[in-house]
Image: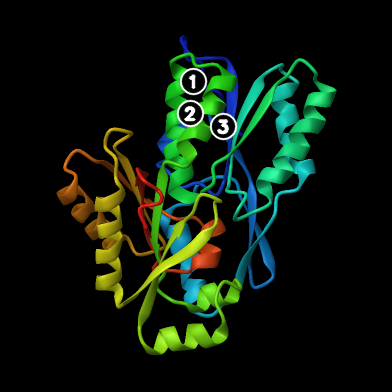
Amino acid sequence: MTKRINLSNAADYEIYIDASLDLDYSWIEENGIHIIPMKYVIDDKEYLMDRPQTEEELKIFYDKMRAGSITGTSQITPYTYEQLFSEAAAQKKDILYLALSSGLSSTYDSSLTGARAVMEDHPDVRIECVDTLGGTGGMGLLLMLAIKARKEGMSLSDNAAMLRDNALKVCYWFMVEDLIYLKRGGRISSTAALAGSVLNLKPVLKINDEGKLVNISKQRGVPRAVKYLLECYQGAVDTALENDVIVAHADCRERAEKLAEEVRRINPAARIQVCPMGPVIGAHTGPGFVAVIHFGNRNYR
């Protein structure tokens, strides 16, 4: 477990987040953030992810997907949350937890069940579970806000309320390179996957206000799909909010770096992190996935 960093002006509660986030690991390490481990599966063999993985580790994972390995994930149980939250509760520490979208996973509901059990055993401890209504780099952006607010002394309840207010201001624009992975996940039919592959169609998706993935466009070829992502960013970004941007990618750093350059041309003041995407989300999107994630108008398209 990551050791806790004591900050003189910081409010005194612990921050937990799912392993499904994508963010520069220094934010996690330097601020004593606790990672909730998540499991992913490759060809029926289960692996535990309890930290952000290196690009070398992720390349092995995505190369296995390219070679035809079947991948998936398994849910975190309420008992796991109860065990992990109990560690902080035993030290009389309150907890702020950021969960993967309830529209994508049952982890948020499981966390509520686990939190209730811990608070029954420790009536003097408060646990706030926040549904981020997103994942990957969007969870990273919200974590950055949570860390800053805690450092500035914001209370647990106010921090949770602030995060819930900002969750719907995080915009997610995704491109998926190969439709086969969406087919395996049951998001599109076999017929649609075959037709899309023949026509070289690249789906562009977003996360809606319910925290669910929805298809907003199909573009022929990667260049057009990337151009569409940039159009979405330019139309939706609100620099009056936060000017941080995460470009997440599934083993396609060169594509992500070029995308980041174009974002910077649109918004020279943007603070951009290019982050590799972990296997928890990548198991469902496949390699070649790239995303622009930022604050703005989530319903632009």
Question: Which one is closest to the eye, mark 3 or mark 1?
Answer: 1
Q: Nearer the viewer, mark 3 or mark 2?
A: 2
Q: Describe the element under mark 2 as helix, strand or loop.
A: helix
Secondary structure beneath dot 3 equals loop
Q: Which amino acid type is marked by label 1?
A: Arg
- Residue plotted at (46% across, 27% down): 147
Q: How many marks?
A: 3
**Amino acid type, mark 2:** Ala
**Image quarter (top left, top right, bottom left or bottom right) of the N terminus:** top right
Q: In this figure, which residue is indicated by the disc labeled 1? A: 150
First in sequence: mark 3 or mark 1? 3
Q: In this image, 91 relative to 287: left or right?
A: right
Q: Which residue is mark 3?
A: 2
Residue 146 is labelled as 2
- Residue 288, position in %: x, y? 39, 68
Seen from the viewer's position, the closer of residues 301 and 17 is: 301
Instruction: Give x and y (percent) for residue 103.
Output: 60, 53
Q: What is the quadrant of the C terminus in the image?
A: bottom left
